[in-house]
Amino acid sequence: MRKKSKLIPILLMIVCIALSAVVIIPFLVIFLNSFKGVREAAMFNLALPSELVFSNYLQVFQQTNILRGFMNSFFISGSVVFCINLFASMAAFLIQRRDNKFLKFIYYFFIVGLIMPVAIVPTIKLMHDLNINGTYFSIIMYYTGVMLPFGTFLFVGFMKNIPRELDEAALLEGCSFLKLFYRIIMPLVSPVIITVTIVVMLFVWNDFTGPFYLVTDVSKWTIVLMIFNFITQYSTNWGVVFAFMMLVISPVLLTYFLLQKYIIGGLTVGSVKG
């Protein structure tokens, strides 16, 4: 029994290392090859560059409108984050604070939204009928609809741990229902707000399917769409392509490394009573 108990942690460590390598090795390939010339980068290996080619990054700025792509991605991601935090927190407050069968049905309706896949064809048809297809508003509303169930689920789970006596005391003191929500409840759910902000931001930033089908105007392309277009044009120079990829994923990596403790904390908070 003792041998088995010692063997399990070792096997788990080996599995974790193998899974980490699946993620780390492709990233190292991209990073190292972004500093290589045309011939070396085409080898797709982990060898160090014989000569550092920093001009790959300069070519990215010269040959693409990468700053426009960053602005579009930040604008769309930021707008979606604002909508999700606002609408999901308001919906969760009503669902959790009121014993209403209709609101309970709405909550289960949101849960179904976590499971159901996105139907992109009816979405495009609806946007055409509303005459909003290809606009910033359409892609923002698309992502808001996709991520709203996730945000509502997290907010409801966390608000269960906020005692209702706090609401009663505030209402007895003359606080309106709206002030109760914004001045008392919202500051208490800040860990979930941070978690939702990070997860939604990363999802919208990295998503390709939504912009590919819904953004028809080149000037509104996100940074991920620009990568797709850039690869088709400059696939003969993988050093420049890898440099483009490094510039795109750098904000995501920086955000995750700086705020990963908030992601884990926000996802687990409210899951255990005590």
Image (cartoon, grey):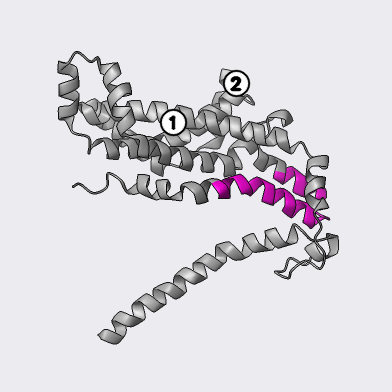
Residue 168 vs 56, above or below: the answer is above
Q: Which residue is mark 2?
A: 132
Q: CA distance from mark 1 to mark 2?
A: 20 Å
Magenta-drawn stretch contains 230? yes
The segment highlighted magenta reads 227-254
The label number, if any, that marks residue 84 in the structure image = 1
Q: Looking at the picture, which amino acid does disc 2 mark?
A: Ile
Residue 6, percent from left and from top: 32, 81
Left or right: 131, with 68 as reference point: left
Q: Looking at the picture, which amino acid does disc 1 mark?
A: Ile
Residue 242, percent from left and from top: 73, 54
SS at circle 1: helix
Left or right: 51, with 158 as reference point: right
SS at circle 2: loop
Query: Label 1 crowding class (10 Å Cα cut-off): few <14, some 14-19, many 20+?
Result: many
Q: Is residue 124 visible?
A: no
Q: Quadrant of residue 93?
A: top left
Which of the two residues, 50 or 20, is positioned nearer the viewer here? 50
Total tally of numbered discs in the picture? 2
Q: Residue at coordinates 83% horizontally, 41% vertically from top-left?
A: 62
Q: Are marks 1 and 2 in contact (CB under 8 Å)?
A: no
